[in-house]
């Protein structure tokens, strides 16, 4: 199944084609939401980010980088009232940056994007951290400290991040230092899209799930597991030709895949549907 190329997707593809230096996190995150809600005023939402940064200026500390981050956190999560949506975590609107700006609620990754983008506008250098189960924000000039945007911007040490992982996974997932490494803009957007794909699949919104799956492949073109995952969405939608193409790409690029037999069975099942 070929989906119509939306203006938002076209703009995202152009940014990716221009190179990673041109992949603006705030704009790209807004384009993700604009695919689902085409009426969104992307430029107006960018202006809202600018306004948040401008309103922060009078309160911005002149002290250390950590003090400046504290000013940013207080402004967004106290003065402006942004918070984590613990009551309805699975609402897809939590993954759309324009909705976060309007409703002032979100999930860890979108609130982190908000924090990074407002910080960037006032000269505070932050980066995304794709920590398992809970996205965080790292301070470029304060290694070993992280911001939990979902919980009112509390500052976490490495040991506190380890404890968070233990609680969130019940101790099943052991901590690795790479979990706190900076995450690229493309991977941040892919993680937003994975959240959306999984939410849509859970609620049987298969066409929306396919949009998200296709965007993940666009953002991470050499992640062959994501190509397989898109194939599964195609299969569930009944787009068997597209599913077979994705499955064939997967087993070609990953010939020793442990699930190769299962994927080959799906290819055969898809051919039977097409015959």
Image: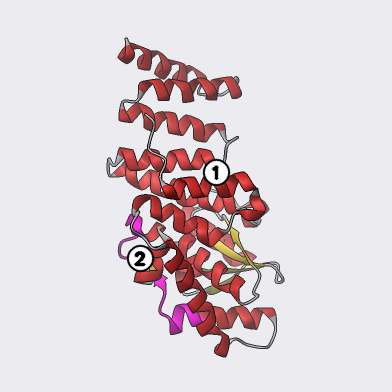
x, y (%) of residue 98? 40, 64
Query: What label does residue 85 carry, if any?
Result: none
* Residue 82 covered by magenta stretch: yes
In the rendered image, is residue 183 in sight?
no
Q: CA distance from mark 1 to mark 2?
A: 28 Å
- Whichever of labels 1 and 2 marks the residue nearer the N terminus, that label is 2
Which span of residues is magenta-colored?
A: 74-93
Question: Is residue 147 shown above or below 76?
Answer: above
Q: Residues within 10 Å of mark 1 (few under 14, many from 20)?
A: many
Disc 2 target residue:
86
Q: Measured along the vertical axis of the image, is residue 20 above or below residue 264?
A: below
Residue 203 higher or lower than 132, as above or below: above
Judging by the rendered image, the residue that carries numbered circle 1 is 219
Mark 2 residue crowding within 10 angstroms, few (<14) / some (14–19) / many (20+): few
Q: Quadrant of the C terminus?
A: top left
- Return the x and y of residue 95 as percentages of the image width and height: 41, 57
Question: Measuring 57% from the left and 37% from the top, which residue is drawn there?
Answer: 221
- SS under mark 2: loop
Q: Position of residue 14 (x, y in %)?
A: 56, 46
Tag 1 near tag 2, CB within 8 Å: no
Q: Nearer the viewer, mark 1 or mark 2?
A: 1
Q: Give the camera-side residue of 202 and 52.
A: 52
How many labels, in total? 2
Direction left: furthest residue: 204
Measured as percent of width and height from the top left, residue 201 is found at 33, 41
Which residue occupies 60% across, 19% down?
255
Whether the magenta-drawn stretch holds residue 200 is answered as no
- Residue 132's place in the image compared with 87, above or below, is above
Which residue is depicted at the point 43% across and 68% down? 44
Front residue (pair 243, 20) = 20
Q: Mark yes or no: residue 162 visible.
A: yes
Residue closest to the eye, 178 or 36 = 36
């Amino acid at each position: 199944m070929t989906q119509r190329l939306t203006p938002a997707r076209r703009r995202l593809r152009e940014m990716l084609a221009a190179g990673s230096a041109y992949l603006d996190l705030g704009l790209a995150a807004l384009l993700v939401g604009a695919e689902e809600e085409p009426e969104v005023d992307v430029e107006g939402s960018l202006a809202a980010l600018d306004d948040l940064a401008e309103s922060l200026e009078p309160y911005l500390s002149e002290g250390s980088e950590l003090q400046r981050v504290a000013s940013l956190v207080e402004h967004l999560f106290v003065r402006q009232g942004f918070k984590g949506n613990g009551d309805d975590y699975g609402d897809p609107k939590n993954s759309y940056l324009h909705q976060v700006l309007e409703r002032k609620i979100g999930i860890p990754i979108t609130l982190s994007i908000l924090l990074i983008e407002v910080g960037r506008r006032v000269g505070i250098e932050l980066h995304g951290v794709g920590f398992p189960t809970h996205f965080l924000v790292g301070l470029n000039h304060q290694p070993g400290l992280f911001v939990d945007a979902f919980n009112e911007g509390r500052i976490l040490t490495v040991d506190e991040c380890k404890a968070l992982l233990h609680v969130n996974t019940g101790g099943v997932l052991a901590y690795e230092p790479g979990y706190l490494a900076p995450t690229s803009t493309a991977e941040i957007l892919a993680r937003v899209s994975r959240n959306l794909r999984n939410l849509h699949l859970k609620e049987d919104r298969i066409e929306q799930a396919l949009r998200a799956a296709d965007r993940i492949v666009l953002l991470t073109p050499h992640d062959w597991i994501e190509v397989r995952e898109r194939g599964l969405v195609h299969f569930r939608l009944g787009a068997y030709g597209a599913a077979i193409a994705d499955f064939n790409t997967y087993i070609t690029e990953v010939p020793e895949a442990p699930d190769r037999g299962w994927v080959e069975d799906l290819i055969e099942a898809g051919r039977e549907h097409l015959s």
